[in-house]
Amino acid sequence: MMRSMTTGERPDWNRIVEKHSGRVFRIALRILGSVQEAEDVAQDAFVEAYQLHRAGPIQSWTGLLVRLATLRAIDRLRRTRRSEQLDDTVQSTTTGPFEEAVATELAQSLRRAVAQLPDQQATIFTLIYLVLRVV
């Protein structure tokens, strides 16, 4: 467990990143569904955590980074949703437009529902049903 630091102390960023990067990335990925977007959000969360540390002591790096990853992923999801436009040129060769629309709608509904779960429940659900593909 990491202890809180005073404002003047320098955090061991290698240790912080090593300990929390996986969790921060998984949270962002679960919300966004995109590896590239999740990587960007993880980086943003660590940069923001560093800036907050400079402003004052951090009591819990885990709590701070989980919260930042969740908030920044939701912010990015909202921005993406506002700017989404229908692209008529993209078509799948394995399914028809109806199947694609249904799959996209179901994926978005599932992503929203999982995002509303408490962090631990959402992580367990994601690991069991999405990562390990247990059905």
Image (cartoon, rainbow, N blue to C red):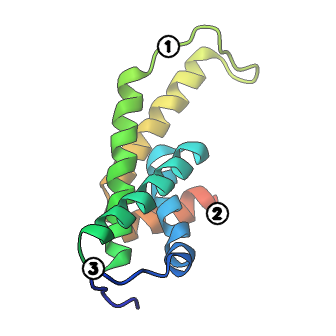
Indicate which disc, 1 or 3, sits on the residue closer to the N terminus.
Answer: 3
The residue to which callout 3 is attached is: 7
Given residues 78 and 2, the one toward you in this image is 2
Q: Secondary structure at mark 1?
A: loop
Specify the amino acid type for callout 1: Leu
The quadrant of the rendering that contains the N terminus is: bottom left
- How far across and down, in percent of the image, does residue 38 sit? 52, 50
Question: Residue 129, how many percent across, how many down?
Answer: 55, 59
Q: CA distance from mark 2 to mark 3?
A: 42 Å
- Nearer to us: label 2 or label 3: 3
Residue at left offset 31%, top offset 80%:
60
Distance between the Cα atoms at labels 2 and 1?
31 Å
Residue holding disc 2 = 132
Disc 3 on helix, strand or loop? loop
Q: Nearer the N terminus, badge 2 or badge 1? A: 1
Q: Amino acid at mark 3?
A: Thr
User: Of the numbered discs in the image, which one, if any, rests on residue 86?
Assistant: 1
Q: Viewer-proximal residue, 73 or 124?
A: 73
